[in-house]
Amino acid sequence: MNVQQIPNWLKQRAYLTPDRPAIKSNGVWVTFQELHQRVLHRANQLATLGVKKEDRVGLLMKNSFDMVIMVHALMYSGAVNVLLNNRLTSSELMWQIRDVSASYIFCDDSLEGEIHKLEAIDVVTHSELLSTIAADTCTIVQEFASDSVATIMYTSGTTGHPKGVLQTYGNHLWSAMGSALNLGLHSDDRWLATVPLFHISGFSILMKNVIYGMGIVLHEKFEAKQANRAITEDKVTIVSVVTTMLNQMLSELGSSSYPEHFRCMLLGGGPAPKTILEQCRDKKIPVFQTYGMTETSSQIVTLSADYSLEKLGSAGKPLFPCQLSIKKDQKLSAAFEEGEIVVKGPNVTIGYWNRNDATLESIKDSWLYTGDLGYLDDEGFLYVLDRRSDLIISGGENVYPAEIEGILMSHPAVTEAGVVGITDDRWGQVPFAFVVANKSISEGELLDFCKGKLATYKVPKAIKFEKVLPRNASNKLLRRKLKELIEEGHHND
Amino acid sequence: MNVQQIPNWLKQRAYLTPDRPAIKSNGVWVTFQELHQRVLHRANQLATLGVKKEDRVGLLMKNSFDMVIMVHALMYSGAVNVLLNNRLTSSELMWQIRDVSASYIFCDDSLEGEIHKLEAIDVVTHSELLSTIAADTCTIVQEFASDSVATIMYTSGTTGHPKGVLQTYGNHLWSAMGSALNLGLHSDDRWLATVPLFHISGFSILMKNVIYGMGIVLHEKFEAKQANRAITEDKVTIVSVVTTMLNQMLSELGSSSYPEHFRCMLLGGGPAPKTILEQCRDKKIPVFQTYGMTETSSQIVTLSADYSLEKLGSAGKPLFPCQLSIKKDQKLSAAFEEGEIVVKGPNVTIGYWNRNDATLESIKDSWLYTGDLGYLDDEGFLYVLDRRSDLIISGGENVYPAEIEGILMSHPAVTEAGVVGITDDRWGQVPFAFVVANKSISEGELLDFCKGKLATYKVPKAIKFEKVLPRNASNKLLRRKLKELIEEGHHND
């Protein structure tokens, strides 16, 4: 009785508010009823191909109306959406596809080349899918059970292989509800999605779309001018951004300002610099900074616009259904005392796919140990000190030093590698590598080596050769000391 | 893992939005932080008195700030709020208090006389409570589990004794969320509560208060002029009403209209007459008609204002998390086909207190069989034909004919009794009785007999003596035929 059975979200929307505009994509609005009809047809095509309940199905697609249809069609079929990051290299992708034991991969025609043919996995391109006949007897899922897994998104940990985060229907539903309790919900709300749908930041907009019955405007990719135009012309009221995007939108906006109806910049990926917040204050742009991760199915802590300058650098307070603690040595930290950020809530993942070890390590007594460091002030506002110790956030993408170090060390000439983030005007941060080599090799050769194996945004901006890397007594790499090396380097410039 | 643990609602509000206005009562606003402090103190007083987790505690109070404090203080203590209808007679109340095995009754001083002293029940008046010293070691509940019982409200069935409806924390939370998804949620929202807090209509406003972090204006009782004044002067945006209240507000309003910020009349207790809806349309008052019951923890079906005239007489469509069916002979009815209204959703009760029989009869496979008759049109809009077959709704109160018939038949002179509702200008409906007597007795004597045993609003407006009552082959009273008798009587006038 405790598992909530909520009616199939999009189908319910098509029943409750059939004629409301649902999605604008490529200049055209479709209603919830039209979207439902398209998804129903797609679900019938999937049935022809043999997609079954609980199949894990990979989606390797760029932001598009078709991707939206695929996401819902898989939900209608009862299959699990495995959202694949299309910026990854072929070998990174294949690792995830094998790990999740996907039955099918649906991909954009342009991305087919990234997938190696494997037995037991059907790879279906978009044009193949379009020519598939629709079965007329597809049994669609009528109710979404709160504890069923809806999606899997891979996230790299600080060490080792990426892990598939399990997100249930309940997780997505509560994420949307928690956000509505925080930001409110207006009948004229429209949300702009320019962030990738394969990330939780974009995906959560698709969920709000059907749960709220709210129109969304979907862009294939972020382009500041188009984003600003969507606010003015498409009457967008809320936009999800990271700092680098907000920055570009502000400069593109120039001396103009946004119309009255615009009510929220939802800013993820770390706190914004003061100068940007001041610009936004002067232009009356409400910025809601957030802290969240794939494991919390989007934001879990938010700083309301009223506090953005007063509590500069803070990530805010938890969403209504959520809780937040700082823990050190298994004890709760006092105000201003640093420790690990620990969170709880109905939007928090039930664990990692096929990784019981990692699940048990991260989730204890329903609390998620984020690995991030931070503290609470005396009013309970969160300040994040270090994301996952050494996480680099580059243009909104998480980059894990350990992953890049692993690739560098796989080169025969490299014996040690250390990677840290350095600030970058365009991307916020970019990775910078330190290497100890056992024979002569150039920076260019090593960078080329990385490019074949790492997504472009993970390839170090530069590589510096060292005789030895700073380590502590137990031989653990001290990445903070590497940062100091860079800062010293800058001083010496 | 499926039971959601949501942080103690008011306490969380006092953390997230401490300075926001929470409740205006007797002309004074208190913030969420102040409310929390008052409730904390009260919970400590309850601890002194010995109130424990899972105790069932009766509240016999009139709408007041103190009642709000008691409701939350019992939640802080982990006790179950048993909301007693202060319009009931002493014997009706005592039946419920015995049935629920209450450990404590907290009552207004003025209502103490209604409670007979019983062993094993502590009766505490408000002034006794105020002089109780607060314990300093009260352990307050930090998280509300979605499957824990928060409240019990008694409702009379079509036959037999009243039943205690169990409403969980999850029920109240989902009721609030479902309503927000339907009506939206604005940062300037203020809800006016003039309906009784012991009913789900009023109680659900208290829950929205803390879940949304929305201000409410509390009136001790409904008074049209004060209600209109709250809309204009206290900037109320939403009011819960029944038709008779709306009617009075409209006549009091005269040729004036409501300010722009007012956005919703949430109308319960049956569909509104066309003339009222037309008046509201002309005055640009958005009326959202709803269908709901104690068992659904407030509304479950709502007709949005856009459809109030187009779909005249309809109760609308379900809230987003809810489902609705019409069933006859265990089969789903087609469009326009009459049957029993069956509903499902996370706001639906888990059952009746200590009445497994009634629970099993009403809830099958998570669907609640409401006993109400209705049909869906071809777009899925609900039309309610008969509430619980013969339910009379008088000024927003449910009046069950079977209960009044039982009282009438307990008189030695009465062998048969039948009660139906007749339309009434002030209350919408009032009960009207037909009686077969075995010796001479006057209408006045029988009415006096009723007054001692039934709440005033349940006492029949008139009693008519008959030689025989219309019954079907299996001897079941045909209340519809009684209605025809009245209509014939009117024709003969």
Image (spheres, coloured by chain):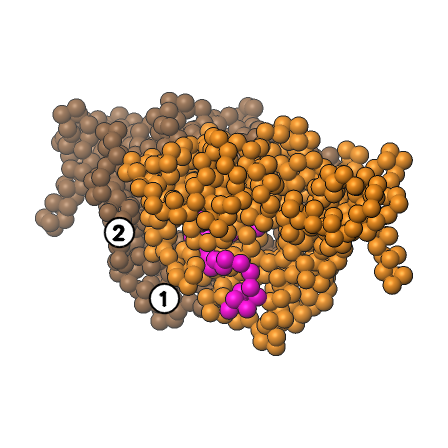
Chain colours: A orange, B brown
> In this picture, which residue range is highlighted in magenta?
A201-229
Q: Residue at x 70, y 58 (%)?
A: A428
Spot occupied by residue B2 in the image (x, y as percentages of width and height): 54, 31
Q: Determine the secondary structure under disc 1.
A: loop
User: Is-magenta flag for residue A104?
Assistant: no
Q: Is residue B356 left or right of residue A449?
A: left
Circle 1 sits on which residue?
B284
The CA span between labels 1 and 2 is 19 Å
Whether residue B205 can be seen here: no
Amino acid type at circle 2 is Gly
User: Which labelled disc corresponds to residue B313?
Assistant: 2
Q: Position of residue A193 (x, y in %)?
A: 52, 57
In the rendered view, tell whether residue A193 sits above or below residue A69: below
Nearest the camera: B451 or A339?
Answer: A339
In the image, A177 versus A273, the foreground residue is A273
Q: Amino acid at mark 1?
A: Lys
Query: How packed is label 2: few (under 14 Cα within 10 Å), some, or many (20 or more)?
Result: some
